Image (cartoon, rainbow, N blue to C red):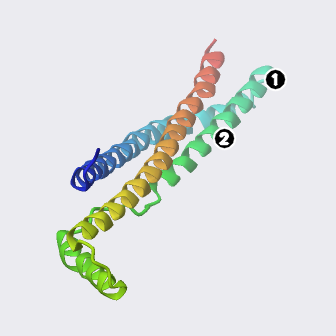
C-alpha cells in the first residue's frame, strides 16, 4: 500500500500546506483592522447622533436608535473578542531538522535497540519514528488550523452583523 518513505513525503507536504493555510488565515487581521478603522471613523458620528437624537421629541426614533447603537456595540465587541483570540500566538509544529533526524533520532533508536537486545533495522525504525513525529505535527497543526479558522469565521460573521443595525439606524433617521 504505502511505503514509509511515501508516508513521510505525504506528511511533509500536508504539514507545509497547513502552515500556508495558517498564514492565509492571518491575512484576515489586516482586513479587520481596516474595517475597525472604517467603523471608528463613523462611530464617533454615530455616537454624536445618538446624543442629538435624545434632544429631539421623537420617542420612537430615540428608542430605535439606542437599541441599534447597543446591538452594534455588542456585535462589534464580540468581533473584537474573536479578533483577539485570532491574534493570540499558538505553537505551530514544524518538520524536524535533518540533523535531528540523522543524528539525534537515529542515536536514540540505536540505544533503544541495544537496550532491548533486538535485531531491528535501525534505518527503518528511524523512518517510522520520524513518521510518527510528522503525523503528530500534522495533527497538531490541523487542530490549530480548525480553531483559527473558526475564530476567523466568527470574526467576519460578527463584524458583518454589526454593520446591519448601524445601517438600519442611519436609514431610518434619514427618512
Question: Cβ–Cβ below 8 Å for labels 2 and 1?
Answer: no
* Farthest residue, direction top: 175
Instruction: Mark 1: give few (<14), some (14-19) or many (20+) Cα within 10 Å.
Output: few
Query: How many numbered callouts?
Result: 2
Of the two numbered discs 2 and 1 in the rendering, the one whose residue sits closer to the viewer: 2
Q: Where is residue 117 drawn, in percent x and y?
A: 33, 85
Q: Residue at horizontal 58%, vertical 23%?
A: 167
Q: Which is nearer the N-term, disc 2 or disc 1?
A: 1
The disc placed on residue 74 is 2
Quarter in which the N terminus is drawn:
top left
Residue 16 appears left or right of 84: left
**Nearer the observer, 133 or 18:** 133
Using the image, determine if residue 152 lies above or below residue 56: below
Instruction: Locate residue 31: give its quadrant.
Output: top left
Relative height, residue 91 to residue 175 (above, below): below
Closest to the observer, 28 or 49: 28
Q: Quadrant of the C terminus?
A: top right
Asked which quadrant contains residue 114, the reply is: bottom left
Q: Which residue sits at x=27%, y=74%?
A: 120
For label 1, the SS is: helix
Residue 157 in the image: state x and y as whole percent.
54, 33
Q: Residue at x 23, y 77 (%)?
A: 106
Which residue has dot 1 on it?
59
x, y (%) of residue 46? 59, 33
Disc 2 crowd, CA 10 A, few/some/many (<14, 14-19, 20+): some
Distance in Å between CA atoms under marks 2 and 1: 23 Å
Dot 2 lies on which element? Answer: helix
Q: Residue 93: which disc?
A: none
Where in the figure is residue 100, as x and y percent of width and height? 23, 74
Tell which of 96 and 59 is nearer to you: 96
The residue shown at (24%, 82%) is: 107
Q: Is residue 94 left or right of residue 74?
A: left
Amino acid at each position: 500500500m504505502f511505503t514509509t518513505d511515501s508516508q513521510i513525503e505525504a506528511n511533509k507536504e500536508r504539514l507545509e500546506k497547513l502552515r500556508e493555510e495558517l498564514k492565509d488565515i492571518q491575512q484576515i487581521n489586516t482586513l479587520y483592522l481596516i474595517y475597525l478603522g472604517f467603523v471608528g471613523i463613523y462611530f464617533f458620528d454615530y455616537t454624536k447622533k445618538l446624543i442629538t437624537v435624545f434632544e429631539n421629541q421623537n420617542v420612537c426614533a430615540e428608542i430605535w436608535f439606542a437599541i441599534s447603537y447597543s446591538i452594534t456595540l455588542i456585535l462589534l465587541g464580540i468581533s473584537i473578542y474573536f479578533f483577539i483570540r485570532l491574534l493570540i500566538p499558538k505553537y505551530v509544529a514544524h518538520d524536524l531538522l535533518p540533523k535531528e533526524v540523522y543524528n539525534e533520532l537515529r542515536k536514540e533508536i540505536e540505544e533503544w535497540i541495544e537496550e532491548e537486545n533486538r535485531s531491528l533495522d535501525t534505518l527503518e525504525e528511524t523512518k517510522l519514528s520520524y513518521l510518527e513525529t510528522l503525523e503528530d505535527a500534522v495533527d497538531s497543526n490541523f487542530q490549530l488550523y480548525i480553531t483559527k479558522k473558526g475564530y476567523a469565521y466568527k470574526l467576519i460573521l460578527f463584524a458583518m452583523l454589526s454593520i446591519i443595525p448601524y445601517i438600519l439606524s442611519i436609514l431610518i433617521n434619514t427618512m
